[in-house]
Amino acid sequence: MPLKPDSVHIWRTPDGHHDLHWETSDPSTAVEVEPVVAAAACAAEARPLPPGSAGRIRVTGLPAVGRHYFRLRDSYGTEVVAPARGLGLPGGVNFRDFGGYRAADGRRVRWGYLFRSGNLSRLSGEAQGMFSSLGIDVVCDFRREDEQVSDPSRLPAGTRCINLAITPGSQGSALYGGRHRLTGAEAMAEAMRDINREFVRSQSERYAALFGHLLEPGNERFLVHCAAGKDRTGFAAALVLFALGVPRETVLEDYLLTRHYFDPFGELARVREKYDMHHLEDEALLPMLQVDESYLGAALEAIEAGYGSVEAYLEKALGVGPAERAALAARYLEEEG
């Protein structure tokens, strides 16, 4: 059986290689991979990644400059053309494109228009050049003011930034007061579920403002980010995809891709210092730095409890009704092919 188009994930490694993963209905299905680039421009080489099974390959030898697209074609004639979702910006955190997904009407979210990320304060000069090449019109920063002051974003001059601080009501008690409450992994995981519930209960005004900016003329290429690019940003990206008609299962898959693009172990020292949690073992802290289906699930349960459905929440709480969704679809969805 053929290649599954929505299973294709491509990311650029910090050293410039491209890793491609995909799934087929039958593991024995042959899939050809080729970069969409002039033959004279490079001498690309594709080789399987460990463990060397079907559906995993690394492409090397592509030019360092520019964003590369790849064509995957199976023996049944199914073809997918897609760029790297994870862009591998040096110093970037969880920086990726959340386009390419199929909506319920059969159209796809356009690549190169919707981006999500974590902290942008460590971007190298090379990364800033890569950022400029993406043509992003506006950056929406969900971090609190103190986060923005302590870790100011390093963006190219002239980048338009919008500050929409997301501060869930329970975050202070769950994390800043964590010395007294958080004693293990499950307690931390429940605190993260509480934070996601609070996105719905106390932060809808901020997410409504996000959609207002997203619908403004001239704001087509849009980046949303926070510190890790997984919670405040993850909920925002999920809402945008829902508004575009992307199925729940696919939205969840995008949410969980943080597991590929974010290293929680590399952030343990930072969060210990930030939240004064030196008393906690790694195991207890890790749920704070990870994503889990139950985290986004808690937000969706809060939506269903309060509004009945995601569609009703979008319209009643965020002001994104049929007209606004149609405008978003006209901007961000395209026919396949």
Image (tube, grey):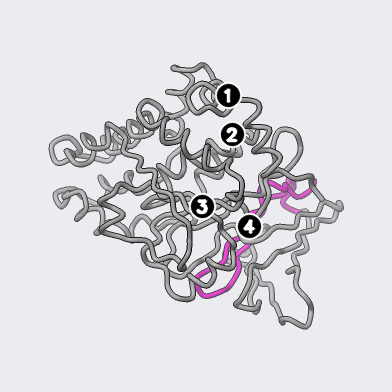
Mark earlier in primary sequence (3, 2): 3
Residue 308 at x, y percent in the picture: 52, 16
Tag of residue 21? 4
Q: Nearer the viewer, residue 119 or 287?
A: 119
Rendered position, 144 above or below 72? above
* C-alpha gap between disc 3 and disc 4: 24 Å
Residue that carries the numbered disc 3 in the rendered image? 223
Callout 2: helix, strand or loop?
Answer: helix
Neighbour tally class for label 2: few under 14, some 14-19, many 20 plus, Cα within 10 Å: many
The answer to whether the residues at label 2 and label 1 have Cβ atoms under 8 Å apart is: yes
Which stretch appears magenta? 1-28
Tag of residue 265? none
Callout 3: helix, strand or loop?
Answer: strand
Mark earlier in primary sequence (4, 2): 4
Residue that carries the numbered disc 2 in the rendered image? 242
Residue kind at label 2, given as amino acid type? Phe
Name which residue lies at 26% across and 47% down.
285
Neighbour tally class for label 1: few under 14, some 14-19, many 20 plus, Cα within 10 Å: many
* C-alpha gap between disc 1 and disc 3: 23 Å
Q: Nearer the viewer, mark 4 or mark 2?
A: 2
Q: Is residue 208 left or right of residue 54?
A: left
Residue that carries the numbered disc 1 in the rendered image? 311
**Where, by quadrant of the figure, is residue 72 drawn?**
bottom right
Is residue 64 inside the magenta stretch? no
